[in-house]
Amino acid sequence: MGLPLDKQFVPPALPLPPEQYSATYHNELNKVLRLYFNLLNLHLDEVVNVLNFTGEFDTIYTNVIDANTVNANQVNALKAAISQLNAGVITAGSFQGGNAVFDNMTAAQANASLFTGSGRELNYPHIAASDSTDQYADADDDPTIVKWDTADELRGFTLNNDYTATAEYSGVYKIDYSLQFANTANAAHDVYVWLQVNGSDVAKSASKFTLPARKSAGVPSFVVAYSSITFNVNAGDDIGLWWATDLAYNPVGPVDGVYMEYLPVQTTPFPHPSAPSAIGSIIYVSAPDPARTRVTPIGVLGTGGVGAVTFFIT
């Protein structure tokens, strides 16, 4: 369906001037120019009505954008026709699009009585990582960073050589971790785990876990330390998970104590996958507060009103 902005303007054929001054010639010339500019003004008024949304929304919806299809040709035609579209208020009984993407969309107010969609095309920043080695604290009561040797999933994050993860986007995030601790000592011992951002402790992020005494000599006890923390992140922040124990195991000797143990894939007495010493994920929860006003709707259906909206299409 073509856009109503597609107007063809052809300059008029002007009368040829005589060699001598003629009032009749100038009258005819002015008449031709007046008719042309009247036609031009008429079409420009139609363009202004569309750009300012001064007409009925249903008329614009029907004539400018097909109610069932919004395709690339129409979007490109609209971009070619206007470089900037400003709308004070848009009120719609229904707004539907399979794929609508704007370079920049800001809204002082957006309300809808119904907004539904599967969200299957949305990609959120996240990282999932694990470690396939035994991990030891440097000493008793000595904070030690949790190590990660594999990024199982990665989008919007960088896994660094110092075992931190750098976020590419600001927002509210949630970290979930599971650490497999072993205790070879013949007494119970404690482990603390907490979160740091840019080398500083995150308030209220610490958890305490108590490992019971070993089962027997050479057979340690195990505790899987799990916790979930929601926290704020700025783009470029480095996130690290730390732990410490009151009795650190030392493989040299060895000296009994607490460490994180990796268990490889096994086939007997029954087959099962490996058990990482550490496994965790950081996922995006929401935009930072206050939320940015940029919106890119994809595959959504909404019914209601949208007010005080400004679009910039480039």
Image: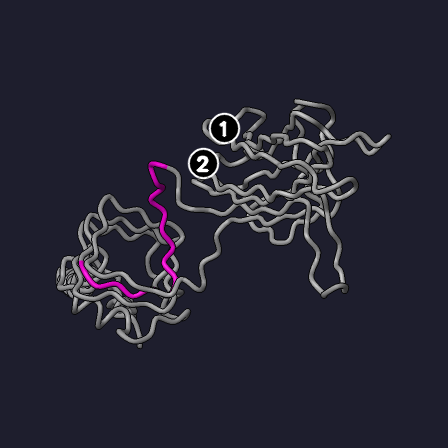
Kind of residue at badge 2: Phe
Where residue 155 appears, x then y in whole percent? 57, 51
Residue linked to disc 1: 202
Which of the two discs, 2 and 1, labels the residue nearer the N terminus? 1
* Cα separation between marks 2 and 1: 8 Å
Residue linked to disc 2: 231
| Figure check: 136 above or below 99 | above
Is label 2 in contact with label 1 (beta carbons under 8 Å)? Answer: yes
Q: Residue placed at 36% from the left, 54% from the top?
A: 313
Membership of 294 in magenta stretch = yes
Where residue 29 appears, x then y in whole percent? 19, 63
Q: Residue placed at 62% from the left, 37% from the top?
A: 212
Task: Determine crowd level at label 2: few under 14, some 14-19, many 20+ residues with C-alpha closer than 10 A.
Answer: some
Where residue 239 appears, x then y in whole percent? 57, 35
Q: Quadrant of residue 58?
A: bottom left
Quick one: quadrant of the N terminus?
bottom left
Q: Which residues are magenta?
A: 289-304
